[in-house]
Image: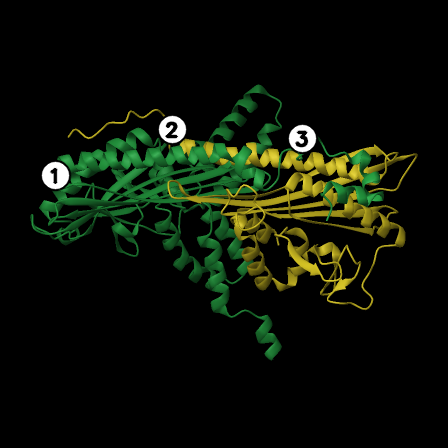
Amino acid sequence: MADEEEAELSEKQKKEIAKWFLLNSPPGEIQFVAKDVKAVINDDVLYEEAASEAFPLYNKSHLISIEMPGRIGDVIVTSYGELAETEFIDPRTAQVAVVDHIKQASALFFFCYMNPMIPKMVGRVELNWGTSGARVNALDQLSYKTLSRIMVIKYEQSMNLEHADDRNQASMHLFHYDILRQLMGKHVCTEVRPALDEELPSAYVEEFRCALDAEILKYVGEAYPKGVCSVYCGNGKDVEGPGFDFELVVVISAARHSPQNFCNGSWRSVWSIEFKDEIQMLELKGKLQVGAHYFEEGNVQLDAKHECKDTTIFQSSEDSAIAISNIIRQHETEYLTSLEASYSNLPDTTFKDLRRKLPVTRTLFPWQNTLQFSLTRDITKELGIGK
Amino acid sequence: MEAAMGLMRRMPPKHTETSLSALLSLLPQHSSDLLSQVDQPLQVLCDMEYGKEFILCEYNRDADSYRSPWSNKYHPPLEDGSLPSLELRKLEVEANDIFAIYRDQYYEGGISSVYMWEDDNEGFVGCFLIKKDGSKTGQGRRGYLQEGAWDAIHVIEVGPEEEGTAHYRLTSTVMLSLTTDNESSGTFSLSGSIRRQMNMHLSTEEGHLCNMGRMIEEMESKLRNSLDQVYFGKTKEMLCTLRPPSEVVMRLPDS
């Protein structure tokens, strides 16, 4: 009995392990990890529990962005915009998005909604569905997995066909298959509601927030091809006018998932700006984090973090916004430069401490002479290379 | 098992040990499969008799003991632990000596061990291991690395000799992690593991050790190069897609 208890993990331990795996997923890969964790844990109830705890944490720490319906923009999943476990505010549109942390199947609905051609195309892959709205809903019920499996099979089949027409179709399948693969791991929120007054900052704070948002939006648009950003009020959102401190938080998130190129990555930065009324200064603190995973015939990951600080003077909302976004731009540009320097130092300095490209002798190792080496150990001792 | 291997391909390589022990506790029934299929960072024991360290792996393990290539004895002692034949042991001793010199020339430090055993079809297998701690506090001569580890595992199967030639099949894995840390750029950490195979049919005129050594040397250089150029390069490429280092015009504050 005692032995059995020792060998068997408690449910709690199993759940903790499951969460550990989920939380350590590389950028954009939690769905793939989840599938494997589920199989390894082999206990659906336990898995669901672990997933319901780990997904929200992962989503928030990875600052994932989710497209809101009606193409009004993206909402970032971050603790700074978290109203309830599934509710995240988008201060720019003053909308609150209801987010399902785990499910991503609704991506398909969104996809069909955006591309009326898709149901037709899916029809071609023998699902035999029309284009009517009702059918599109039916498509939404279909799991992503099923659909992508059909696409893969269809693609593989058509690659073997001889006729040019069929091959054209094959390349079309490939194209759509790629789109579907890109959709993998993309969340979509299906429900938004307008934010309540008490969820929004005061008019005074909003003036600073809004001005900064406009500047940051400009900067992110220039610097990050696929970046999203948002400015939140961290503290003092009810401050009505001068005389009190408040804090704004800039969140920037850029992610790139290209499983077809075996590479995923994300850039995340969070800047908190404290507006110190008494000393008329702004104190900035930035936390930057970059992760990348390359996994073609191997597993290589980059994990880089940096923190920085700066200050500037308290000015009007517009001037503060410009000053802040300039500081952020400067620090992030410098950080990128230092990352590039770290990379260029690799081959000749950093890597050398692990293994040299060539031996100290700068020639390949003389294997043909080694017999003498080992037969006459005294020589190696004299050379001071033997131990 | 498939899912477990899938997880190992995604978890950060610097957490390999944690991942593996988690999987072992979840899937005790697959422990031998996991241990043989997942390469993990190498562990070291000291052979007190020779005052030298040796590397532990599945190939020098018998029960819970590991055979030292220096004294040929198991640690902790094991009554009837399996040993290579006398002839093969001679080759093993020689290989360990030569490989230690090779290791010192490329790694400027580190630990190496070579193990050999007979296989079922008249050939033999050699396992060449290298472990290097390149951190500032370890054996990093230049002191650039906060943390730096290189573990190489080369398993080479040698077929029976036929008309002066033999077939060699080499499977190599390199696991490495490196972290630099400084004020201006924060922590920068890269970790990875890759595995490759190489098959060759060679004349045994110069002896097995010569052939095995050359193959390992070539493979190690290839692996080092692809980690450096291809794998790290791809993560850099990703970084530059996320935030292109375009010559963004630095606008100074108006004031």
Task: Tell me: residue B243, above or below residue B114.
Answer: above
Q: In this view, does A66 lie to the left or right of A83?
A: right
Task: Tell me: residue A10, above or below residue B116.
Answer: below
Where in the figure is residue A79, as x and y percent of width and height? 29, 52
Residue positioned most to the right? B163
Q: Badge 2: few (under 14), some or many (20 or more) residues near its Cα, within 10 Å?
A: some
Q: Residue at x 51, y 30 (%)?
A: A174
Q: Chain A is drawn in which colour?
A: green
Q: Name the residue under label 3.
A: A362
Tag 3 subunit: A
Residues beneath discs 1 and 3 located on the same chain: yes
Residue positioned most to the top? A164
Q: Residue B245 carries which label?
A: 2
Q: Mark 3 or mark 2, which is nearer to you?
A: 3
Where in the figure is residue B237, as x and y percent of width and height? 47, 31
| Nearer to the camera, A237 or A262 | A237
Q: Name the residue under label 1.
A: A315
